[in-house]
């Protein structure tokens, strides 16, 4: 769960726990209203506990390349992440040879 969704669920759970049951209970509730307020508060508390125990999402995909071929005339043998995009790890092992202008062997983070 992303941080934004986690915060949203926590805020909505707190509002649900406090608002409606409080409004119901201020107006001399009957047995049905008291039961409804109890159920709604329990659901809000369960949502709050669930959101608090969610782990952040993984860093992203893992890119890996091994034993690539040759690159020439601007080619790339390995992994290309223009502008450093991508949040996961990138590993290049035993990449091939790069010859020629702008050829890359390994990981290319350039634009």
Image (cartoon, rainbow, N blue to C red):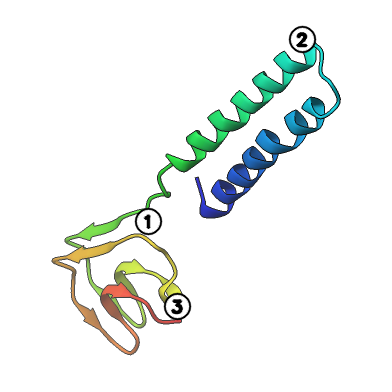
Residue placed under numbered mark 1 in the picture? 59
Q: Nearer the viewer, mark 1 or mark 2?
A: 2
- Mark drawn on residue 31: 2
Give above or below for 3 relative to 79.
Answer: above
Element type at marker 3? helix
Instruction: Describe residue 85's horizontal placement relative to residue 43 as left or right.
Output: left
Residue placed under numbered mark 3 in the picture? 83
Q: Nearer the viewer, mark 2 or mark 3?
A: 2
**C-alpha gap between disc 1 and disc 2:** 49 Å
- Say which residue appears at 57% left-offset and 50% top-offset: 7
| Residue density around tag 3, few if under 14, some if 14–19, many if 20 or more, within 10 Å | few
Q: Position of residue 9 (x, y in %)?
A: 60, 42
- Say which residue appears at 24% left-offset and 59% top-offset: 65
Instruction: Describe residue 22's horizontal placement relative to residue 83 as left or right.
Output: right
Q: Between disc 2 and disc 3, whose residue precedes?
A: 2
Give above or below for 51 relative to 4.
Answer: above
**The one of 66 and 48 positioned closer to us in this rendering:** 48
């Amino acid at each position: 769960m992303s941080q934004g969704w986690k915060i949203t669920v926590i805020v909505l759970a707190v509002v649900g726990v406090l608002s409606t049951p409080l409004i119901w209970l201020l107006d001399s509730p009957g047995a049905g209203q008291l039961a409804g307020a109890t159920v709604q508060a329990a659901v809000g508390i369960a949502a709050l506990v669930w959101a608090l125990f969610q782990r952040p999402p993984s860093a992203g995909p893992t890119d890996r390349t091994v034993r690539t071929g040759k690159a020439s005339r601007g080619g790339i043998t390995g992994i290309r992440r223009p502008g450093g995009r991508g949040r996961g790890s990138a590993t290049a092992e035993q990449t091939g040879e790069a010859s020629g202008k702008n050829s890359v062997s390994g990981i290319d983070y350039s634009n």
